[in-house]
Amino acid sequence: MTLIDNAVYVDGVRVPDPHTLDETYSLMHERGGMAWIGLYRPDAGEIHSIETEFGLHHLAVEDALTGHQRAKLERYGDTLFVVLRPARYLDAEERVEFGEVHVFIGPSFVVTVRHAEKPDLGAVRHRLEGNPELLKLGPEAVLYAIVDEVVDEYGPVVAGLQNDIDEIEKQLFGGDPDVSRRIYDLIGEVMDFQRAAHPLAAMLEALLRGAEKYHVDLEVQRGLRDVLDHALSLAGHADAFRATLQNALTVHSTLTTQQQNDEMRRISEANLTLAEDTRKLAEASIAQGDQVKKISSWAAIIFAPSLIAGIYGMNFDYMPELHWVFGYPMAIGGMVVLAGALYTVFRRNHWL
Amino acid sequence: MTLIDNAVYVDGVRVPDPHTLDETYSLMHERGGMAWIGLYRPDAGEIHSIETEFGLHHLAVEDALTGHQRAKLERYGDTLFVVLRPARYLDAEERVEFGEVHVFIGPSFVVTVRHAEKPDLGAVRHRLEGNPELLKLGPEAVLYAIVDEVVDEYGPVVAGLQNDIDEIEKQLFGGDPDVSRRIYDLIGEVMDFQRAAHPLAAMLEALLRGAEKYHVDLEVQRGLRDVLDHALSLAGHADAFRATLQNALTVHSTLTTQQQNDEMRRISEANLTLAEDTRKLAEASIAQGDQVKKISSWAAIIFAPSLIAGIYGMNFDYMPELHWVFGYPMAIGGMVVLAGALYTVFRRNHWL
Amino acid sequence: MTLIDNAVYVDGVRVPDPHTLDETYSLMHERGGMAWIGLYRPDAGEIHSIETEFGLHHLAVEDALTGHQRAKLERYGDTLFVVLRPARYLDAEERVEFGEVHVFIGPSFVVTVRHAEKPDLGAVRHRLEGNPELLKLGPEAVLYAIVDEVVDEYGPVVAGLQNDIDEIEKQLFGGDPDVSRRIYDLIGEVMDFQRAAHPLAAMLEALLRGAEKYHVDLEVQRGLRDVLDHALSLAGHADAFRATLQNALTVHSTLTTQQQNDEMRRISEANLTLAEDTRKLAEASIAQGDQVKKISSWAAIIFAPSLIAGIYGMNFDYMPELHWVFGYPMAIGGMVVLAGALYTVFRRNHWL
Amino acid sequence: MTLIDNAVYVDGVRVPDPHTLDETYSLMHERGGMAWIGLYRPDAGEIHSIETEFGLHHLAVEDALTGHQRAKLERYGDTLFVVLRPARYLDAEERVEFGEVHVFIGPSFVVTVRHAEKPDLGAVRHRLEGNPELLKLGPEAVLYAIVDEVVDEYGPVVAGLQNDIDEIEKQLFGGDPDVSRRIYDLIGEVMDFQRAAHPLAAMLEALLRGAEKYHVDLEVQRGLRDVLDHALSLAGHADAFRATLQNALTVHSTLTTQQQNDEMRRISEANLTLAEDTRKLAEASIAQGDQVKKISSWAAIIFAPSLIAGIYGMNFDYMPELHWVFGYPMAIGGMVVLAGALYTVFRRNHWL
Amino acid sequence: MTLIDNAVYVDGVRVPDPHTLDETYSLMHERGGMAWIGLYRPDAGEIHSIETEFGLHHLAVEDALTGHQRAKLERYGDTLFVVLRPARYLDAEERVEFGEVHVFIGPSFVVTVRHAEKPDLGAVRHRLEGNPELLKLGPEAVLYAIVDEVVDEYGPVVAGLQNDIDEIEKQLFGGDPDVSRRIYDLIGEVMDFQRAAHPLAAMLEALLRGAEKYHVDLEVQRGLRDVLDHALSLAGHADAFRATLQNALTVHSTLTTQQQNDEMRRISEANLTLAEDTRKLAEASIAQGDQVKKISSWAAIIFAPSLIAGIYGMNFDYMPELHWVFGYPMAIGGMVVLAGALYTVFRRNHWL
Ligand SMILES: [Mg+2]
Ligand SMILES: [Mg+2]
Ligand SMILES: [Mg+2]
Ligand SMILES: [Mg+2]
Ligand SMILES: [Mg+2]
Ligand SMILES: [Mg+2]
Ligand SMILES: [Mg+2]
Ligand SMILES: [Mg+2]
Ligand SMILES: [Mg+2]
Ligand SMILES: [Mg+2]
Ligand SMILES: [Mg+2]
Ligand SMILES: [Mg+2]
Ligand SMILES: [Mg+2]
Ligand SMILES: [Mg+2]
Ligand SMILES: [Mg+2]
Ligand SMILES: [Mg+2]
Ligand SMILES: [Mg+2]
Ligand SMILES: [Mg+2]
Ligand SMILES: [Mg+2]
Ligand SMILES: [Mg+2]
Ligand SMILES: [Mg+2]
Ligand SMILES: [Mg+2]
Ligand SMILES: [Mg+2]
Ligand SMILES: [Mg+2]
Ligand SMILES: [Mg+2]
Ligand SMILES: [Mg+2]
Ligand SMILES: [Mg+2]
Ligand SMILES: [Mg+2]
Ligand SMILES: [Mg+2]
Ligand SMILES: [Mg+2]
Ligand SMILES: [Mg+2]
């Protein structure tokens, strides 16, 4: 059953509850009171009796059944059709969840059609029943009380968004690279909230502009103006959130480049060390090459005479030089000449 | 033949179809009914009889023949000329395709000129013929039904765009580098859609502002307001899409820089490894150079005495030292002195 | 001579051309017709007779002589002063070139002052002379025809800009780094065009707002509304071009960073190869160093005994060890001990 | 006690101070004067007597007790409820601190409710008591004086922000990488200030628009216009600060990339040096390799004949070659042939 | 003395100059003329006599003494108080310097208070004295002439800004990295100019709106409209400059990244060369290592037999092998076996 509550109020006081809608209608007519019927996701059949009794316009009823409407206000003769978009903040998902409530305001009736858990219309009814002076002002006072509840419920949404923005700022300047996704997603939520809050404020302004013409009670007007003031304040916060998050996106881009600079500085340091080490290595290698040349040269200079010594150390019987008187000095001389010749050649080739 | 449908309605009910346009005109006059003539891409000749009969203004007819108009509303005396821009979403190409339909509304006639497949005016006519109460309200009721159809057809366009934006967000945070082209192109489509939806809403607002003055039936006014509400809601979505896609562009730029940071970190790691390996190489090379020097030095120290031994191992007959009593110790001493001298030299040169 | 054309029209028909401006004035008065005088860049002297005859205001004349005005509309008594900014697109230079035309509209005269080749006022006059019904409506019909021509000439400008934007998009996604200059310059041109098209539309709106008050003929009003519609459409395109080009600038920045990522990936690959090759080099170098140590060690182990053999191969007469019975085994033993000692030392130093 | 000051003024002159609020009320009625009651953070109980006496509206009182309101202006019958947001700049923290003051203006009373140290209402009262001509104009003159004080106190805020922006510009172009956080935070503060200054100006404009209707004294109107002028001037500065800081954010991003370019140029230089050194190293290494081959080859060519010499230096009794007449030339020939063969082989292998 | 000029005009003609302000007042009253008093930075004392004589409002006088006002227009009874912000362009510093001039316009007087060198009020007075027809129209004609001068002086400012923007574009696309500071600073100047030009245009619009109500002469109205037109044109230029410079900032950021790409390409080339050289070096080094192994191996193979030859070349008396018949072949065999064994070992270790 989608009928949540169903009451008649006379002079702001609830009379004993009717058992059926038809009883409501007759009670309302007999006692000259105001009916307030609360529905939850009704279907076309369920709303039909109400539509007929109160002469609701079929386009408004269609909207109320279909849902997915913007916050808006439409007059059909002396009936007012209002769409409200309550919201709550799901902090774990960082998502603004929107509900939808439709309100029909006639000269002597209020019909509320709720599509989500929010707003808490039971609480609104309860508060109003505790304030007969206000309730006596009729259906528009009920509208005021509902809109007030919807806007009051926007408060925690704004607080939740502010809180997440504060966290984001910490993340942002703490160097977390994943913050861009969070910022991007939160901008989406803030934009959704802006698209709810601004039309609501515009709707309240339209309602207040028409208040004189439609003889809305002065106290109800003042109440609506108070709600409008609250809505404008919250919308102003949302606008600021949007701008702040856009800046956070820009700053994040710069900080990302700065992290790059740090990384690049590390590379730069490594490259300078590398270049220095490579230079040392090249120098060592070239010096080593020089030494290899020097050593080999000296080895040749020393070794070549050894060959002469080896030759004259051979034991052949017939080696005439061995018997020459000047054989020995000649051999030593040969050694010196050979070493000198090599030394000269190596000097010329810059091996020494 | 561009004449799609041609009917006369009396009190909201279709009378037996006339065979020619001339029959339509006389039927309309005799029975006091409303003519509804539907054309598809007519040329100047084909529209001439209608233009004359209904006194259509030549500038409006020129627009209807030329096409490429913005959504707009123009009054010529008691004739209303309306241009509508129907749209459909070609999901495969991610493109919004726009059509164009022109509607002439006179006191007792409706002429529709269609330039594309959309909107489905046959369906509109069919629905209206099933609702004589509405049709009875005359030509402006037909206009309302057509505009309603056009705006209803915008719904899938918005849904298609939303769907592609969701895909883009997955691509974006999944690191696909080609997403910027998709974002850029989709912004173009969203902009095209905005340029269709906003003038349509403005046109409906203008129509409603003039409704009292031009005695538009109250129910038609309410219908138009309902359509306007729908159009504003869709235009609001398009505006949000635009902002979201612009942010996606910004975020993509940041994410691209972040990918660069990752790449840079890889380079940085490689460079540090490289620098470390080069340092090791340089150390090894320098150590190796030292060893080469040491080895060569010791080789020289050992080899030089060998030369003396080689010399005194020669077999010359006349080698006086061989016969000296202290020849042998002298040779050994010479070897030690030579080795010691080399050792001293090498120590001084830091080769040892 | 700056007088381009000079005619009097009676009931929409051109009467035989006067020879001088004075003839024009008297003809106009005698026949009760409308004078249309066309000037090209006149100087103060040349405009003086017209200024006096028609009572043109000196501030308007000053504007017409000086040029460099915005599109605007000013009333001086029953004279209207209109400044128009015709444009054409120089595709080779990708530049929008603006002209300027001033129009004075009095109860029975039109004076046009042209400062550039565009708009083609000769063609306008020719078309109007072929349409006496329109021309009969008087000076404001001439104004309408001129403004229509100016706005029609904006069409090719928009087409040319669209064409260049299409080319730019190809360049952009084709990776051309020079596209930013082209985008930047084209934004400048689009801005110039916006600054011409928007004031023109505003001027037409002002003209239409005052149309009732100043008794502008209904058909002329409709014509002006048609031109306004065209101007708004073109201005809408220009606005979209601007937004598109701004996005192209943003996308270009992202694509440039992406090119950087590709380049960085190339560096990254090169660096990894380099690091791998350096590691191999270091390993080879270190292994080589080890071998050098081993080889040198073994060379020393083998060579040291050679020195002993060399010593005992010397031929001194007095070498007591040679005559010892155990000289030979002792020498071999000495060799083995020397080699073993070296081996032990090298092992300890980890050279072996 | 939250009652800060409590006085009655007759013809602009303060009469002897009443001791209690009740005395104030009677004094006010007897003497036909104006009461001015100043409160500091009252609670509901404390404000109750005032609420009753002056008929303050409960919604306004609720706002005054709760705080956290936007600057606003509400009329409740002949009472005006004004919320003001004074501000001061905490330079050390670079933060704009906002206070809140609520003012109730009735025909013969002023009630001020202050929630922060600012604005200095004591000073306002003191200045006004020194200007009885102004004070005589009644409660709205007091409102003017308070708003004037609030706006005057905005002056140092704007000056402080300007000063920090100047510092930021120095930091920005001095290359400080931390400036982005400072810019980001200061934008937040400027936005807060904009959200205070713009509503205040709007409120003053609303007040002035209603001035004729509500018979506000002409001099008070002029004073309010003067304050409005000041407020607009300050709001204009804040708007410019916002735009300037946004540009600073953009410029900072570019400068960060430029620093990267510099770093990259350093890397580039290091890499070129490195490549050059590596090339030298490679050349030296290859040249060294060639020399090692050459040296080894020559060593083999020289050493191989030594082996033959060694063999024929052995002292075996039975070595037939030693006794051959051509043994010696044969050995020398063998040496030459061996060396020649090795030379040929090495040449072929390109070791020489 | 701050009194710059002090004259009385009767029917647009200057009468003999009064010597004191008191003479001016009486002259003005006697002759029914208009006084025009020009002051330069007066102090409170100096302005007092004028304030009293003409009944200037103290708030306006306060503004005129304090300065630092926005361009604005305030009516005090039949006196008009106008603040104007003249400007000139200091091209060397690329700075727009603003002056301030205050004008009091009464039924028969003009008081000008100048705070800077600009505007050249002497020239204005001189031109007006040459045009008695205009001057005869009274104080508002003087106001028109002054505003005209102020706006005419804005022309060179716009030209100077345009010129610097042209230079900046050259710098930008010429690759100058310092252009961002110049752009940033010039945006600041353009913003300052916008904040002067837009309020001035708004002020002129307000003046023209009130022109009928306050009986401003038609010719003066036309003159003011001409000035407004000029002001709007200049403000339009300034707005375009702002947008152009913002784009230049964006383009600069992209070009900076492009320069980075070029630098990166240089690094990339260097790295590829480096990697190639390192690969060559590694190959050379490894090849060299192989050769070292080969050479050492062959050295060992040749050297080891030498040791045997050395041993049997020793001259010990008691070496039994020397006397064996097969001693010599055995030694040669030992050499061959030793060399063969080493060869086998080295092959197995892949040193050969
Ligand atoms: Mg509330
Ligand atoms: Mg949270
Ligand atoms: Mg989202
Ligand atoms: Mg959401
Ligand atoms: Mg409140
Ligand atoms: Mg409340
Ligand atoms: Mg619909
Ligand atoms: Mg799709
Ligand atoms: Mg596109
Ligand atoms: Mg498209
Ligand atoms: Mg609906
Ligand atoms: Mg519907
Ligand atoms: Mg980068
Ligand atoms: Mg046209
Ligand atoms: Mg082209
Ligand atoms: Mg340009
Ligand atoms: Mg241009
Ligand atoms: Mg048209
Ligand atoms: Mg046309
Ligand atoms: Mg002040
Ligand atoms: Mg500071
Ligand atoms: Mg903050
Ligand atoms: Mg703050
Ligand atoms: Mg002031
Ligand atoms: Mg003041
Ligand atoms: Mg001027
Ligand atoms: Mg310059
Ligand atoms: Mg600056
Ligand atoms: Mg400045
Ligand atoms: Mg002018
Ligand atoms: Mg002028």
Image (cartoon, coloured by chain):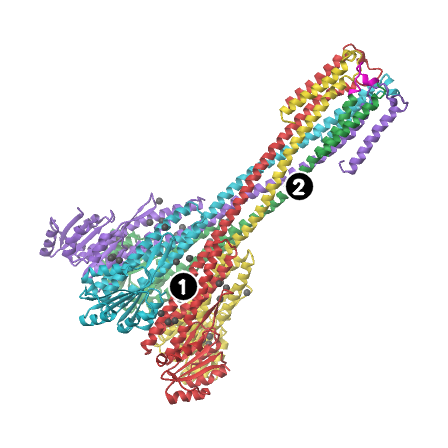
Chain colours: A cyan, B red, C yellow, D purple, E green
Magenta range is: E311-323
Q: Which residue is drawn at 60% across and 47% down?
A: E269
**Residue A284, image x, y percentages:** 63, 32
Q: In which quarter of the image is residue A67?
A: bottom left
The residue wearing badge 2 is E280
Q: For this rendering, which residue is in front, C221 or E231?
A: C221
Q: Can residue B308 be seen in this view?
A: no
Task: Tell me residue B261's x, y (percent).
Answer: 50, 47
Residue pointed to by mark 1: B237
Q: Is residue E227 visible?
A: yes
Q: Position of residue E180 (x, y in %)?
A: 47, 51
Left or right position of C152 against A75 = right
Q: Could you classify mark 2 by the number of other residues whose Cα lies within 10 Å: few (under 14), some (14-19), or many (20 or more)?
A: some
SS of the residue under disc 2: helix
In the image as oriented, which residue stretches furthest toward the right?
A: D325
Q: Which amino acid does label 1 sit on?
A: His
Instruction: Tell me which amino acid carries mark 2.
Output: Lys
Q: Is residue A60 left or right of residue A31?
A: right
Vertical side of C348 occupied by C24: above or below: below
Quick one: which residue is furthest to the left in this view? D30
Q: Tell me where residue B185 appears, x and y as whole percent.
A: 49, 62
Instruction: Specify whether residue A265 is painted magenta.
Output: no
Could you say which is closer to the camera, residue B173 or residue D71?
A: B173
Q: Is residue C139 or residue B274 the one in the foreground? A: B274
